[in-house]
């Protein structure tokens, strides 16, 4: 939630009127969207939940409201969409191929999806994919780009082969530095020569056990907007490294220089800057592991409970390449903190579930703030951290408002 628009925050929370957290159907019906808007979304984005929030339709950029992130494993219908271009129109899984090449590849190889399934061992991991720009809406002065609030994050269960097994099958030369992905989406301009995005990761991240070339999400085909039939799924780093509609991976002998690797894309200044300050191109660094963060997925902001009622609050927390070590909530604007129950991740790079039962000292208005701490002892800041020109890495505490009595 944005700190700068506090008044909006309150108006929004309670314009939902009286919502009982015990009556989820009532809560459902009070969603801000009209039925017409919902059916429009279902029509244009088949398979996607009608309560997702559209930020842009060309290209599609659609976020998940925090209360729809309540599942332990994000379902395909609730997974956010961040497209930079236009997804391929015809997706034929049987015709699809993946080529491995590049300066640091020993021999160029091409695989069909069934080759991948037959030749390599298959793995399944739950992986947290958060857009580097999640939380951008909180920055002031505002940063241009999609105004993500809380919901450009997912943690689905991806099935595929290890990127390292495929890279090693083609041969990784000792001078390898980076991998680069290429997808079959097209540039908004329609220019077939231009790629909307082609990013990658250092070879060390590519060779980690959990870095996958995936064809399945939660045991089903990947939704079209999320990269069917084949994509990279690389947890803990900005989700922009997880290439969708994957058709080629180059093993590079230098830091990849594809689209959205240069300029200030997916980069932050290497030193703290004053809000609004111009930063020279050479003073930016590429974002790698994402900072510690958490979300409150239940209740929904605007909930009301009776005076003597206890409230179960829950959500998820993640910390890039690290683990979350501690989870706390505050009901007094950060003056004091209450420790939550925190689960271990199901596997490395999966988000962790937390919950806590709260009682309130008296009736009235409360905010619930959630704060995670990573295994290095770093916590989420309570206010918007480090302004940067493109509005990346806002990991401030998530807040919701509730009324008691
Ligand atoms: N080919 C391709 N891959 C892509 C993108 C894209 O536009 N094209 N967007 C990237 C960005 S910026 C993000 S945040 C994630 C979003 O993944 P999702 O849409 O499945 O949630 O995909 C990444 N992979
Ligand atoms: Mo992104």
Image: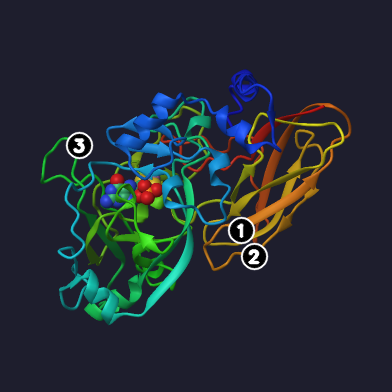
- The image position of residue 232, as x and y in percent, is 34, 61
Q: Quadrant of residue 27?
A: top right
215 horizontally vs 94: left or right: right
Question: How far, Cα to Cα, is label 1 from label 3?
Answer: 37 Å
Given residues 390 and 149, the one toward you in this image is: 149
Query: Do tag 2 and tag 1 residues touch (Cβ < 8 Å)?
Result: yes
Secondary structure state at the residue bearing disc 2: loop
Give the residue at x 31% y 64%: 178
Tell me the residue that label 3 is attached to.
188
44 horizontally vs 78: left or right: left
Q: Quadrant of ligand 2?
A: top left
Residue 266 visible in rendering: no
Sooner in the amino-acid sequence: mark 2 or mark 3? 3
Residue 313 visible in rendering: yes
Tell me the residue that label 1 is attached to.
352
198 horizontally vs 318: left or right: left
């Amino acid at each position: 939630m944005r700190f700068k628009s506090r008044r909006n925050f309150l108006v929004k929370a309670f314009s939902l009127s009286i919502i009982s957290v015990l009556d989820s159907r009532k809560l459902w019906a009070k969603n801000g969207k009209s039925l017409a808007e919902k059916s429009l979304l279902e029509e244009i984005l088949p398979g996607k939940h009608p309560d997702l929030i559209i930020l842009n339709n060309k290209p599609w950029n659609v976020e998940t409201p925090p209360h729809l992130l309540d599942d332990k494993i994000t379902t395909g219908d609730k997974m956010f969409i961040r497209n930079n271009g236009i997804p391929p129109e015809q997706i034929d899984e049987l015709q699809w191929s993946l080529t491995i090449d590049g300066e640091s590849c020993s021999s160029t190889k091409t695989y069909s999806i069934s080759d991948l399934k037959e030749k390599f061992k298959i793995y399944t991991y739950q992986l947290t994919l958060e857009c580097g720009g999640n939380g951008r809406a909180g920055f002031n002065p505002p940063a241009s780009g999609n105004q993500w609030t809380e919901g450009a994050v997912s943690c689905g269960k991806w099935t595929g082969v290890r990127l390292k097994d495929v890279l090693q099958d083609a041969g990784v030369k000792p001078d390898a530095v980076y991998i680069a992905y290429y997808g079959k989406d097209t540039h908004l301009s329609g220019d077939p020569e231009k790629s909307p995005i082609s990013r990658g990761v250092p070879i060390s991240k590519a060779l980690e056990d959990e870095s996958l070339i995936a064809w399945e999400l939660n045991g089903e085909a990947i939704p079209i907007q999320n990269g069917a039939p084949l994509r990279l799924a690389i947890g803990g780093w900005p989700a922009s490294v997880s290439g969708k509609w994957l058709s080629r991976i180059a093993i590079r002998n230098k830091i990849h220089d594809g689209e959205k690797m240069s300029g200030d894309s997916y980069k932050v200044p290497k030193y703290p800057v004053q809000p609004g300050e111009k930063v020279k191109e050479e003073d930016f660094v590429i974002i790698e592991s994402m900072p510690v963060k958490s979300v409150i997925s239940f209740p929904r902001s605007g909930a009301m409970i009776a005076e003597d009622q206890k409230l179960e609050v829950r959500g998820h927390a993640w910390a890039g390449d690290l683990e979350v070590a501690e989870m706390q909530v505050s009901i007094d604007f950060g003056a004091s903190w209450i420790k939550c129950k925190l689960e271990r991740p199901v596997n490395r790079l999966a988000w962790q579930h937390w919950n806590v039962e709260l009682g309130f000292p008296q009736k009235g208005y409360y905010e619930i703030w959630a704060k995670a701490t990573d295994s290095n002892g770093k916590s989420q800041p309570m206010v918007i951290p480090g302004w940067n020109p493109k509005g990346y890495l806002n990991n401030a505490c998530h807040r919701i408002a509730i009324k008691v009595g």
